[in-house]
Amino acid sequence: MNLVELTPGTYHLQGGSNIGLSVQDDRALLIDAGLDGDTAKRALRVIDDLGVTLEAVFITHAHADHFGGAYLLQERVTGVRLYAPALEAGMMEHPLIEPLYLFSGASPIRELRGKFTLAEPCRVDQVIDKPGPLAIGPFEVDVVPLPGHAPRQIGVGVGDVLFCADALFPAKTLDKHQVIFCVDLDEALETLERLPGLPYAHFAPGHGPAYRAGDEIARICAANRTRLTEIRALVHEALATLRRMPRRMPRETSALVAAVSDHYGLHLKTATAYFLTRTTILAALSSLERKGEVETLVRGNRLYWQRVDSQA
Ligand SMILES: [Zn+2]
């Protein structure tokens, strides 16, 4: 875990999933808790080394790699308070919901019950559903809604630093995974558009390095937006054939997952990778459906997606 001090007393603990840390009056506030107990222990060691006490943990969204370590913090530190966004809080108390939604609501297969998609449950002390200033012990934080990647994801502003969760992914992730995870593509785009204009000097995401205000954050947000709009366009294109005239070509969801993955040269190797990719494709489809561009068609006991604009 790489400890980066962004502003005096505010740190970005960079690892597989990053953790934010702010220190004030001998107290510590963590933003997210890492993947598992081991990650949380490493964060506690950093807090110990600084000679301060953990006051509270704010979880930005209910993905196992961000709150998987929260249970251990509650076990180890008496009186620590856990804050989480509405809806996300319910998933943290009932972590089965994450693999459950990835598996269309049915009892999830064994692979989806690993620690990357099924975390240990934790107890949320305060559910946050209002943007704006919030006092947590000696900390004055700002609650900044950043929905899209997760339904009610929240960014936490501490002084000049915005811990912006998974609202954006670093260039490395864009190159490796290509189809970045999102549940609501329209909200994700709106969040990415708004983010660079927010009044912070540093933007510290859940994965990868922190970005400075201005060009740095604008550039990475633009790259994420370009990718999401491109994925949506690829889905739309895959629903037409250009033989003679643009024609409808109804396709099943699995064919669209394959079309987009093929475009990016991806080789999905696990069921988990498939289900994560499928979620983003479904988010693109619901965005297109909301705009009146695609609709479902059930025929021969199959569900197809088809364009609304051009006639077959
Ligand atoms: Zn996430």
Image: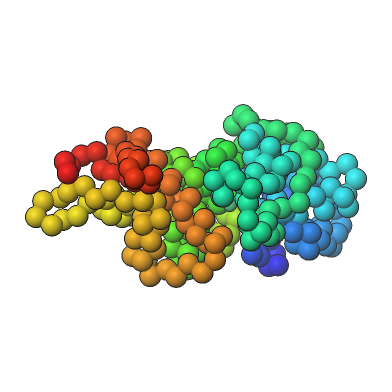
Please provide percent x and percent y for residue 300. Answer: 34, 45
Rendered-image quadrant of the N terminus = bottom right
Relative placement, left or right, of 143 versus 237 is: right
How many circles with numbers are drawn on the protein?
0
Please provide percent x and percent y for residue 109. Answer: 63, 56
245 above or below 116?
above
Residue at 74% across / 33% down in the picture?
126
Residue at 32% across / 51% down in the picture?
251
Q: Which residue lies furthest to the top in this view?
A: 130
Residue at 75% across / 62% down in the picture?
39
Q: Residue furthest right?
A: 78
Is residue 229 visible in the rendered structure shown here?
no
Q: Which residue lies furthest to the front in this view?
A: 300
Relative placement, left or right, of 78 versus 207 is: right
The quadrant where residue 204 appears: bottom right
Please provide percent x and percent y for residue 293. Answer: 28, 39
Instruction: Choose between 87 and 171: the one closer to the eye.
Output: 87
Instruction: Choose between 34 and 156: the one closer to the eye.
Output: 34
Rendered-image quadrant of the C terminus = top left
Relative placement, left or right, of 257 versus 88 is: left
Residue at 73% across / 50% down in the picture?
30
69 above or below 155?
below
Please provide percent x and percent y for residue 15. Answer: 66, 65
Instruction: Choose between 304 and 66: the one closer to the eye.
Output: 304
Color encoding of the figure: rainbow
Relative placement, left or right, of 99 versus 174 is: right
Is residue 119 visible in the rendered structure shown here?
yes
